[in-house]
Image (cartoon, coloured by chain):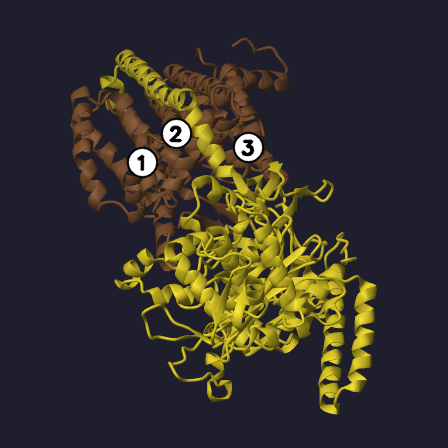
Amino acid sequence: MEKRVTVKSEREEYRLFRSRAYVAALLVLIALSLVFARLVFLQMNQYEHFTALSKENYQKRIPVPPVRGLIYDRNGVVLADNHIEYVLEAAEDDVKDMPASLNKLMQLLPITIQEVNKYKQKLRVNSRFLPVVLRKNLTEKEIAIFSANRSRFPGFKVSVRVQRNYPLGSLASHLIGYVGRIDKRDLKNMDEAQKANYQGTTHIGKSGIEKQYESRLHGRAGYELTEVDAHGKPQLKLDEKAATTGEDLFLSIDIELQIKAEELLKEHNGAAVAIDPRNGEVLAMASMPAYDPNLFVNGISYANYNALRDNIDRPLFNRALQGAYPPGSTIKPMAAIAGLNSGVVTPSSSVYGKGFYQIPGNKRKFRCWKKAGHGHISLNRSLYQSCDVYFYDLAFRMGIKRYSKAMSRFGFGLRTGIDLPHESKALMPTAEWKRKRFDKFWYPGDTVNSGIGQGFFTATPLQLAHATAIVANHGRQFRPHILRATRVSRNLPKKLVTPEKLPSVGVTKLRYWDDVERGMINVVHGAHGTARSSAAGAKYRYAGKTGTAQVFGIAQNKTYDASKLKKKLHDHSLFVAFAPLENPRIALAIIAENAGGGSKVAAPLARKLLDTYLLTPQQKEELMANDDSTESDSSPSLMNINKLRKEAELKRQLKTQALINGSSNKTKNQTIIRPVQ
Amino acid sequence: MNSKNSSGLSSYIFRWLASLDLVLLVALALLIALGTIILFSASGENIKMMNKHTIHLVLATVVMLIATQLSSDLLKRWSFWIYIIGVAVLVLVLIQGSMGKGAQRWLEIGSLRFQPSEVMKLAVPMMVASYLSKKSLPPSFKDIFIACMLVVVPMMLIVKQPDLGTSLLVGCAGFFVIYFAGLPWKWLGASVAAIAIAAPLVFYFGMHDYQRQRVLTLFDPAADRLGSGYHIIQSTIAIGSGGIYGKGWLNGDQSRLDFLPERHTDFIFAVFGEEFGLLGNGILFFLYLFIIWRGLYLAMKGHDSFARLLGGSLSLTFFIYLLVNTGMVSGILPVVGVPLPLISYGGTSLVTLMAAFGLLMGLRRRKRGYDQNT
């Protein structure tokens, strides 16, 4: 105490403190100014930058995928729609005790062990936060059971999924195609704008019309701008733009004709294509066997895919579009036009058919199907009797260059440009082609074979139907197409697709068409026509041409004996036709694989197709009644077969009806217009 | 002064009012009002939290008013015992903590939870001030050394908890006393240099991993975007996106949507900056600066060395709070758990700070009831 009093100087200490306090006050000011300068930097200089970051934080743009457009046939029957499906799903992170929950669920719902295993496998692959589907296609009962027990399964929930659905199953499957999950390859083919448009979309058209018109069917994605908190939980909607539904497509297909064509081809593999010659609309395009496109929508299983891929009948292969068949005699009408136009034959000139053809100076015999030979034969008879020698001679005299060029005017060897992906152009051979392909010279014998649609010459059923339509039209042609009309919205009228007219086949004399047509009429209506039996009792007049395409080469001096050959090596049976004569509304080509002669199999099938398309409902009923009366005359075995067929037919019709009606119940607000013709 | 003839009670109230510094009181009230407004927003309009805050405020005000009545002589006498008890409790907490798990900062007496290190923010400067005020100033080397020991011992105990933020504040509070007592400038310069050299050593050997991480994060917040960098990234976004005028009260997206962590406690300044912008920050900084300067002014008015040293230290410690917190939230200082003084939610810190301001106001008189001019 004493020490303090004596030594301490109050005044000095106060002065000392005061100076220190002033320094402190100044330092405080400087320090706070520095912090404040930082604030000025953040809030003035960097304001925009941080505003953007802040928005990035809390504004989430969630893409809203559009509803895919529907596909209808020409009469409004739904071919592809969107099916609402309920699924049971859960994310791994949301379920506390996964094994126990799965066990309990298996007791509650008919969930199979396979489904559980698949689910576990998917859990391992997917993110812990993403819901994975345990069971698809929940029934209403299953939903009710689960909802009642929901509290026992925290994390599990029933969600709605929209899935592409093909109500008619395998019907026209090659044509309609299917959608599948978007994969890396699909993404690679998209530009940035497309990728943005597909952000919320899971499926994309993989084949057929679904692929061809993907951009129209898909529609435009919308978005929802949502405010989210730090945990990603949506708080409120800031902005939204509704998605634009994809366009509805109306195909030119007549589903009744399509059903008939597929049914007729069930016995044999094969294809049928029908075109309206007046505008190029494809009325039916069948390829059998077919597959169920619904299998592909959510990823086909390996077992199913292998079964389809390894099937010897190749159901995945679209024969109508990609099958390159030797066209056989069905190209004779076009060859005849080519010959007339080039002047190597005239309507009145004739050739002597002695059962085979030999190139002058060559011993090799090119056989005619009629061993005895046709004798002196004119153009007309060469067509209705399908004399091969006449056309061997025609092709030989034209030479491959001229012949090939003339035939390509009918579209042979070229893609028709139909609105479907992966069309084959088959082959209209030329000398250059052979040299390039095989490094071999073109022999005159190759030309001769091409004259009857054999040898290297191949054509797709679509090309054949298209060429037949050109003949029916006397040279005028339209590009074959399947899209008939589009509709942007249900409230707006359909917009028809304008048919694309192609340059006419240049033919110097118009009467040549009549000459060839007469030959084709005689094929079906003439007393000696190769297909006269199949035209019996027709309510309209039509023109046609049979074809029997060799699959198996027969050695010289041997004869073809079907019974000794394997089915796969049997001849293909073909027929082309157009009707009615006065104003052709349908041109078709049909091929039944390994079915035998064209007149025996393909011609009657073609007749049935023409009946299906051209007859009025009353006429069809009459036809049925007539069938009954003829049946009573026939032998008991035949009667039985016919009866069975009839029953099958009825059953099928009922089934189709039910299928179509059923689908109309499923899809709301859609009136299904049944064909009224 | 002139209350000789007044009746007992009224003269008592008059003297009591006269002992308060109304200027500081108004500034504090303004700051607390501003803090309460922003806390309402930062708490997510949480009424329960606001009720608790009100209780804290009432408690803090009562403690402050009591503190104003404590004369500096009284404090000088108590400081030694408060200091000794404080250090003892810190040791106790450490022992308790070593038996439990991880950080142990709280002492639980019944249902009351209480942070003993908080008391040291007042006890250490009081002890150092009382020690040095007995010596002739400027102090000798030996006095400075002993004063330093008085600061370092509790500092180390608090660092061990571990609570770097509080330890730093306690250290500052003690150091400021030595500074005001007349620490020679060359020693000051030498110690700044020593700190500069020691800092890397401390960084590599004396820090916990999480503390080291916080320092690293300051230089590159993006390196650990979701970890320790997250706080700084989100708080700078909040402040920066506030702009000049702010997003408006209750409209801070960063805080409202939970992007800002610890938004009602250590990071409340980011909420303030986001909602009130640079203008609001200007007002806030002006208020703080005013309070600190007023504190220094009051310290100068202290009637003896002890009063001046304690007052100066308390004012500057308040400033350190502000500097460390705003520096951290705006991303120029490492993340250290220091609240924004008088605004961050939390009863302990509010009570301690208000008690300090109470002491500051009472420093002018020697003894309770004594006239200043006697």
Q: Earlier in the sequence, mark 2 or mark 1?
A: 1
Find out whether the residues at labels 3 and 2 contact each other: C-beta distance under 8 Å.
no
Q: Colour of chain A?
A: yellow
Quadrant of res A275: bottom right
Is residue A44 visible in the rendered structure shown here? yes
Q: Residues within 10 Å of mark 2 (few under 14, many from 20)?
A: many
> What amino acid type should be assigned to the residue bearing mark 1?
Leu
| Chain in brown in the render | B
Which of the two residues, A583 or B156, is positioned nearer the viewer here?
Answer: A583
Q: Give the left or right position of residue B58, taking residue B177 as reference.
A: right
How far across and how far down the image is residue A460, in percent? 50, 62
Mark 3 against mark 2, which lies toward the viewer?
2
Residue at image position (19%, 21%) is B184
Q: Earlier in the sequence, mark 3 or mark 1?
A: 3
Q: Residue furthest bottom?
A: A636
Mark 1 — on which chain does it sit? B
Q: Earlier in the sequence, mark 3 or mark 2?
A: 3
Which residue sits at x=22%, y=20%? B138
Residue marked by disc 1: B218
- Would residue A131 be visible to someone looking at this image? no
User: In the image, what residue type sits under mark 3?
Assistant: Leu
